[in-house]
Image (spheres, helix red, strand yellow):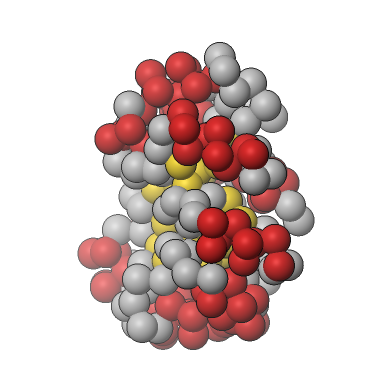
Amino acid sequence: MNVLQIMRTGPVIPVIVIDRVEDAVPLARALVAGGIRVLELTLRTPVALKAIEAIANEVEGAITGVGTITRAEDFDAALKAGALFGVSPGLTPELIAAARDSALPLLPGVMTPSDVIAARAAGFTELKLFPAQQAGGVGMLKALGGPFPDVTFCPTGGIGAATAPDYLALPNVACVGGSWLTPSSAVAAGDWGRITALASETAGLRRCAS
């Protein structure tokens, strides 16, 4: 799958932080059971890659990606863990070169029009607006739609269940990223039913972009 196909799989990509490897598989199964198949596991904890490997091997239907890619070596580590895509908070010449040399599809982060121009020049037209709310939110995305009609966004950062529909109503937004689907209290308690319920509510969100 390419990045655009992954973005179009569902309206929301949950941004997941795993502290305990044993939570990874039941959490992923709960999300998939609720209709959310694309999962972004961030490289913010020491067990992240082990969690990705466990999900890739054990959870049927999950499309597992690695988030918080900030170094060239993260690409190989992600592929070895079984990730199907990567997400970065920004884009540097090092990451551009690594992405070109890697089989891992990358959704790179941008925040400004200059970032979008640089990313597009490097061959990326599917971009993560991050941090979306702080970058100007819905208004910023509307403004970017004029000069960049060929760019599709996945805004992430500061988005919740209440604001996600506003972003998904925009023609240049294929999906949004958010952490509200995996509240830390539910994960800590092993309340996978609650996470499945949140996923079910979210999977039904309507999108303008197709």
Q: Give the residue at x 46% y 17%.
A: 143
Query: As displayed, is residue 103 above or below residue 164?
Result: below
Give coordinates of residue 21: x percent, y percent.
41, 84
Whether residue 196 is visible, yes or no, is no
Quadrant of the snapshot with the C terminus: top right
Residue 138: name its quadrant: top left
Query: As displayed, is residue 184 above or below residue 154?
Result: below
Single out the residue that lies furthest toward the right: 1
Q: Give the residue at x 51% y 28%.
A: 168
Query: As displayed, is residue 180 above or below residue 144?
Result: below
Q: Give the residue at x 27% y 72%.
A: 189
Whether residue 18 is visible, yes or no, is yes
Residue 111: name its quadrant: top left
Residue 54: name its quadrant: bottom right
Left or right: 103 in relation to 85 = right
Left or right: 192 in relation to 188 = right
Name the one closer to the observer, 118 or 185: 118
Left or right: 12 in relation to 101 = left
Give coordinates of residue 161: x percent, y percent.
36, 38
Give coordinates of residue 133: x percent, y percent.
31, 34
Single out the residue that lies furthest toward the front: 93
Q: How many marks?
A: 0
Name the one closer to the observer, 101 or 50: 101
Give coordinates of residue 182: x percent, y percent.
36, 59
Name the one closer to the observer, 93 or 174: 93
Query: As displayed, is residue 47 above or below residue 173?
Result: below
Q: Give the residue at x 52% y 35%.
A: 116
Quadrant of the snapshot with the N terminus: bottom right
